[in-house]
Image (cartoon, grey):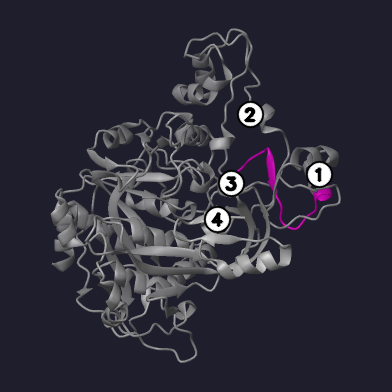
Amino acid sequence: AAAAATIAAAAADSASAAAAALPAATTLHLPDTRAFWAAAAERVPAAARYDARRVEAAARGLEGSLLVAPHDRVEWFLALGELMAIGDEATRRHADALALLPRPAPMPVAYIAQRIDTDDPLWGWQVRHAASGQLQGFVTLTRFTTWSADFAWDSSSRESGMPSARLSNARLRSGEPYGVDPLSHTTSGEGLAEVARARGVDVAELVNLNKDLYPGINSRSKLLDGTRIQLADPAVADLDADCSRKDTPRTVAARTRLPLDDLLAINAARFSGGLEADTPLDGKPLLLRDRESEVDLPIRGVERAGGAEPPPPMPKGKKKAGKAGKAGRGEAAEPAGLRQLDEDCSLTALLAQQERRGDPTKDGVQWTRIAEVGLLASLGGGGTLVRYALQRLKEEGHYHFAVCQATLAAVGFYERIGFRRVGARARYAENREGEWTGYRHWAEADERTVAEFGDTSYLMALDLREWSAGPALELPVADEYPAVAADAKAPDLRRMSYEGGTLAYESGDGVVVSLVPVADGPPGSEPELRMDVTYEIESILSHRGTGRKLEYLVRWVKWPNPTWEPWTHLVGSDDALRDYAARSGTVVTWQRSHHKQKE
């Protein structure tokens, strides 16, 4: 009942109702920080001293587990160490169980912290073992929010990645073997010369094809397992080899059995005079595949030797589920590797019609009828947990859609629940004159630096009104956290210390996350608790520029590559700056009242 009330209130249109359900930020009187954290710590177990590798996996239906709904961001923050440990362990177990190649990377601590800090409203559940109290999984939900002034739901444009995905599906339906790429070879212990002999290619040609991908590669190079070697130039090999002077895009689509609109989308930029369905090609071949926009999903349980990857075997007595469910009598099963997509763009069109409000430069543009699955990790029972959350959304009725930005290793998981990939594009530029690009994975960053947003998001959506929710799930929800059974030999996963008037989580890999009071409201208002993520500096190596353009080359603790950072990113790093000044003979002074630097 408490969880249902939280969802209902958080979904309400009025700001007051949303605040009543779960405050956007907890207020804190500055003089009372130590007392505040002492009181907050009493709401959760005193410690989390256990080894995530030994946590018992949750049952598929979460039998033997219970749910806890954290009351606010503070409780989520206090569990950050557990969230990280279980997230890492869930990724490891998932990759081992399915033999995924390449192995997926776990969610970084900065991403989890920023989502907990920025998602508004924020609600969700932790899954804990009923007997030991140890964390077995978690899910957070929020209202879908975009931070770009120019954002559009769009499954038709090349930038969205959707034309490329639909072309991949079409090739599979036409009989192309799943996972086989004749233009590349994935190694399993051999050297480049051995690859050349096995595939009948001149080794010098392989060096030339792969020198930009792997600087320094030569004919004697030994290759790590899983290295993908190009065997031919895709810019040439992916062109329509059978193109004639009489061809048009329409005739090519019919001959190749590829969708016409998607062929037009990936080739439009190659024809300066414009490209339509009946435009004469005059012998200029169309590109039949858009490799730049393709997503390399991890392959489960297969050997990648030679680039040939057979489809995973289906259990005996089972048929591959098709687009409308299980294949019926007389129906052909869908080919292995087929992705669930918004094939006709209808779902994307519905999303584009939804109400939104807000300012992308302040609190973001909130899509009031679209919920988002923000964070998810589980040591078993993840499908039940997500279905439970979606059933609560569907039952409450405010949200009409649910979206998620899936990691590539989780795409199949979300497809089994009913999600389909949809497309979106955005323009990341302060002056709104930049180029449209595929919508980047969730990030609140400087939109002028698109590279910091990561790759185009694998955005998936589900229409809650049409979703077949299945049998109603009734899971036990505890009012309080269960006591956590301690392992005397294990460290405390909380990794919390009281520093500078607040608690701070130290990840162990050079990242420190703290929840600090920030007074950015109107005069007289109480400060809000906001997440502060900092990276530990190992040393400063060099500098360039002067004045406002001054930058430092920074080597970070436990990070392999140094980065150039503007001086504003180093405000407060006095010890590192003094050490660099002593070593380099550079004099650095700070005028702290205005945060300006003179050199």
Q: Could you tell me which quadrant the C terminus lies in?
A: bottom right
In the foreground, 467 or 498 = 498
Foreground disc of the pair 4, 1: 4
Crowd rating for badge 4 (residues with CA inside 10 Å; few <14, some 14–19, many 20+): some
Q: State the separation of the CA atoms marked 4 and 3.
A: 11 Å
Foreground disc of the pair 4, 3: 4
Between discs 2 and 1, the one toward the N terminus: 1
Between discs 2 and 4, the one toward the N terminus: 2
User: Quick check: can you spot residue 200?
Assistant: no
Between discs 4 and 3, the one toward the N terminus: 3
At 28% from the left and 82% from the top, the residue drawn is 35
Residue that carries the numbered disc 1 in the rendered image:
196
Between discs 3 and 1, the one toward the N terminus: 1
Residue 288 horizontal/vertical position (percent): 57, 26
Label 4, secondary structure: give it: strand
Marks 4 and 1 in Cβ contact (< 8 Å): no
